[in-house]
Image (spheres, rainbow, N blue to C red):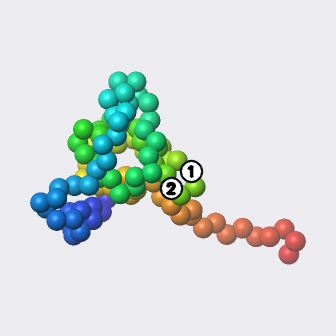
Amino acid sequence: MQPSLVLRSGRSAWKGPYFVAFPNLKQALEDHVPIRTQERSCTILPNFVGIRFMVHNGKDYIPVTVTQDMVGHKLGEFAHTKKRFVYRMTKNR
């Protein structure tokens, strides 16, 4: 994995990491309910480990399960927005 943009540059240290206060965080920990969010720029905190997020990629929601290695990165890094290009021959040629 590449180091997060927060560690390399960007946000100043006195502000701290950018995160969103999810209101159903406790319910997600207890009942294993995924949290639907469009906050791709939210920094993953250590208390998010083990929680499933449904991160919006512009079209639909991608499931992301947070592990210990993801702490410090952004949610949007794990929900890709571009599809892989696949070349297919046309039938009529």
The residue lying furthest to the left in this view is: 14
Residue 11 in picture, x, y percent from top left: 21, 65
Q: What is the C-alpha distance between the residues marked 1 and 2?
A: 6 Å
Residue tagged 2: 57
Residue tagged 1: 60
Residue 80 in picture, x, y percent from top left: 48, 58
Question: Which residue is pictured at 24% across the width and 38% down the height?
Answer: 47
- Please rate how many residues cluster around mark 2, counting C-alpha atoms within 10 Å: few if below 14, some from 14 to 19, many from 20: some
Tell me: residue 18, above or below residue 11: above
Residue 7 in picture, x, y percent from top left: 20, 63
- Please rate how many residues cluster around mark 1, counting C-alpha atoms within 10 Å: few if below 14, some from 14 to 19, many from 20: few
Q: Is residue 74 left or right of residue 60?
A: left
Q: Tell me which amino acid carries mark 1.
A: Asp
Q: Is residue 71 left or right of residue 82?
A: left
Image quadrant where one finds the C terminus: bottom right
Image quadrant where one finds the N terminus: bottom left
**Can residue 81 be seen in this snapshot?**
yes
Confirm or deny contact between disc 1 and disc 2 (CB under 8 A).
yes
Element carrying mark 1? loop
Count of labels in the image:
2
Residue 12 in picture, x, y percent from top left: 16, 65
Tell me the tag on residue 72. Answer: none
Report the front residue among 29 and 88. 29
Question: Which residue is pictured at 64% across the width and 66% down the height?
Answer: 86
The residue lying furthest to the top in this view is: 30
Report the front residue among 76 and 85. 76
Q: Is residue 7 left or right of residue 28?
A: left
